[in-house]
Amino acid sequence: MPRKRHKPEEIIAKLRQVDVLASQGPSIADAVRAIGMTEVTYYRWRQEYGGQKSDQVRKLKDLEAENARLRGAVSDLTLDRIVLAEAARINF
């Protein structure tokens, strides 16, 4: 069975839901089980997304994707520069 990938907005909503349930009395462990996820997942998500709003998470993910794209472009250009420098050194 394939794993479900949650969108950042869904993760934020679930973290808020756990906070609401926990504020009503039961422990964090009970609140986490009530919404159908594990404690490990809850604490991992809370460490990554805790205190953020949905729009902030969306912007962060967009910036990470753009950063990865730019790193790829820089690495390609660096490789081209190295190849050209070696070719110039061999020719002269």
Image: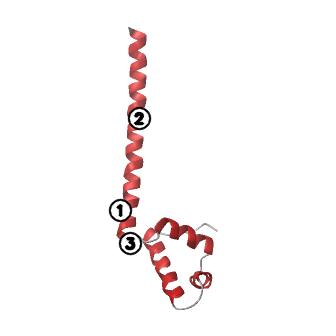
Q: Is residue 44 left or right of residue 65?
A: right
Q: Nearer the viewer, residue 26 or 17?
A: 26
Tag 3 secondary structure: loop
- Residue 78 in the image: above or below residue 20: above
Q: Residues within 10 Å of mark 3 (few under 14, many from 20)?
A: few
Of the numbered discs 3 and 1, the one sitting upstream in the chain is 3
Residue 51 location in percent, x, y? 43, 72
Residue 91 sits in which quadrant? top left
Residue 32 location in percent, x, y? 58, 80
- Residue 54 in the image: above or below residue 89: below
Q: Residues within 10 Å of mark 2 (few under 14, many from 20)?
A: few
The residue indicated by pointer 1 is 59
Q: Is residue 50 left or right of residue 54?
A: right
The residue indicated by pointer 3 is 53
Q: CA distance from mark 1 to mark 2?
A: 26 Å
Q: Quadrant of the C terminus?
A: top left
The residue indicated by pointer 2 is 76
Q: Marks 3 and 2: which is nearer the front?
A: 3
Q: CA distance from mark 3 to mark 1?
A: 10 Å
Residue 55 sits in which quadrant? bottom left
Q: CA distance from mark 3 to mark 2?
A: 35 Å
Residue 69 location in percent, x, y? 39, 47
Residue farthest bottom in this picture: 24
Q: Marks 3 and 1: which is nearer the front?
A: 3
**Which residue type carries mark 2?**
Asp
Q: Residue at x 52, y 91 (%)?
A: 24
The mark found on residue 68 in the picture is: none
Of the numbered discs 3 and 2, the one sitting upstream in the chain is 3
**Which residue type carries mark 3?**
Lys
Residue 74 location in percent, x, y? 38, 38
